[in-house]
Image (spheres, rainbow, N blue to C red):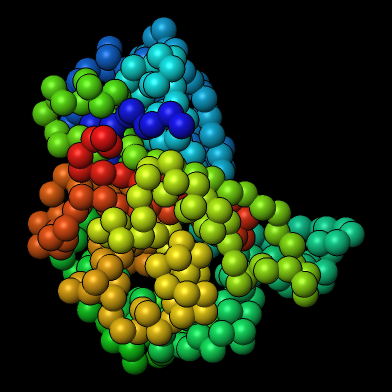
Amino acid sequence: MTTSSAAIVGLGMSELGKVYGYRTEDLAAAAVRRAVADAGLTMEDVDGLLVSSGMKQELTPQFAGDLGLHELGLLASLNAYGATAGVMVAQADKAISDGTASTIVCVFADTPLRENKRTGAAWSSSATHLSGYRGWQTASGAVTPNILYALATRRHMETFGTTYDQLATIAVGQRQWAAANPLAQMREPITLDDHHNSPWVADPLRRLDCCLVSNGAVAIVLTSADRAADLPQQPVHVWGYGQAHRPRLLAKDSHWGLETGAVASGAHAMTRAGVTHADIDFLELYDCYTYTVLVTLEDYGFCPKGEGGPFAAEGHLAPGGSLPCNTGGGQLSSYYMWGFTPLSEAIIQIRGDGGERQVPNNGLAMVSGNGGILEYHSTVILGREARA
């Protein structure tokens, strides 16, 4: 089996959160230039570009021209929704390994927030007319991610006895991490009662179970592990990755809501990396909802199926716990940049740049990406040292 040979050597972010007055392309360009400078390189060094097209298809391959890039060996627009960041890292690693490109930038940018409009309006849309199998969704009103993830959460609760308190513990723990993250949108501590008193979004999900909405951009630079050793930043080595994508089957005999693509994706990544669960120092899990943290934790095998709730309630994921998770606050409390939220925090931690939230053991991280309504999944394992 071919081993991974790429390393992340640059990280750049635009302003994040309630940032107004910029085009998506403007924020993306700022993040890319900061990432390249962070790597100690110039734009002339870049010969590969992968852009995440996002929900509104605002970034396209034409963005390369906006950056003034020329003679690229790799150029593509990718979209696996929240799993895109992990897919990008895998594609970049392969391209570097086979010589397609030597210095690859991956970027995501989004500007859903509008000034003087409520946050929820960023994702609201009228129901579309559907026929056949999915027509029931329009008829029943199950047409938004909040409602569909609420169905998945309820199924997990009814099947395994998962409780509101256990979901709330995830939100509270991640807010504790966010309190030490200067980039986080939400840093004020919360309690279980705060969670339980927050407004319903879609039963059983409350506002504090749901991710933020953010404007901004994040970019990374990858190159070969050999070249990374001569660059200024601590390299973040790609050890392994995996993907698993499955259609949304909302049928009574399906495992939808109980098991996700994280099972196969995580297993592929760990096999490729040659590691076991005991080797992983910390997790950065895609947390569009508290529920997705819980179900991914189970599907990755860090606790038995159905025991994610009790595991979280015991404090394992929060600061001081045995398995630090979403150490910057995640998408629930820091910023929502699709899969680049967990990816960027893993890079920060492995570099040792976490400040007050820095985890003591930062040798190996597992990073997840989840897209659609539990339809797309990617996993990346990153290490402080090059894989032997």
Q: How far across and down, in percent of the image, does residue 85 sit? A: 44, 42
Residue 71, by quadrant, is top left
- Badge count: 0
Residue 379 point in image, percent of width and height: 45, 49
Q: Position of residue 72 (x, y in %)?
A: 42, 12
Give percent across and percent down for residue 221. 30, 30
Q: To which quarter of the image does residue 34 belong? A: top left
Name the residue rendered at 40%, 77% in the picture: 208
Instruction: Kindly give the residue lying farthest to the right in the view shown.
Output: 132
In the displayed structure, 77 sits above or below 175; it is: above
| Residue 336 against residue 302 in the figure, above or below | above
What residue sits 46% from the left and 61% below the top?
300
Which of 198/41 is in front? 41
| Residue 1 visible at all | yes
Q: Could you tell me which quadrant the C terminus lies in?
A: top left
What residue occupies the far top of the structure in this picture?
A: 71
Most foreground residue, 23 or 346: 346
Answer yes or no: is residue 200 visible. Answer: no
The residue at 13%/49% (across/down) is: 353
Give the vertical position of 341 relative to 357 (above or below).
Answer: above
Tell which of 261 and 88 is nearer to you. Answer: 261
41 vs 264, left or right, is left
- In the figure, is residue 379 to the left or right of 366? right
Drawn side of residue 22 relative to residue 125, left or right:
left
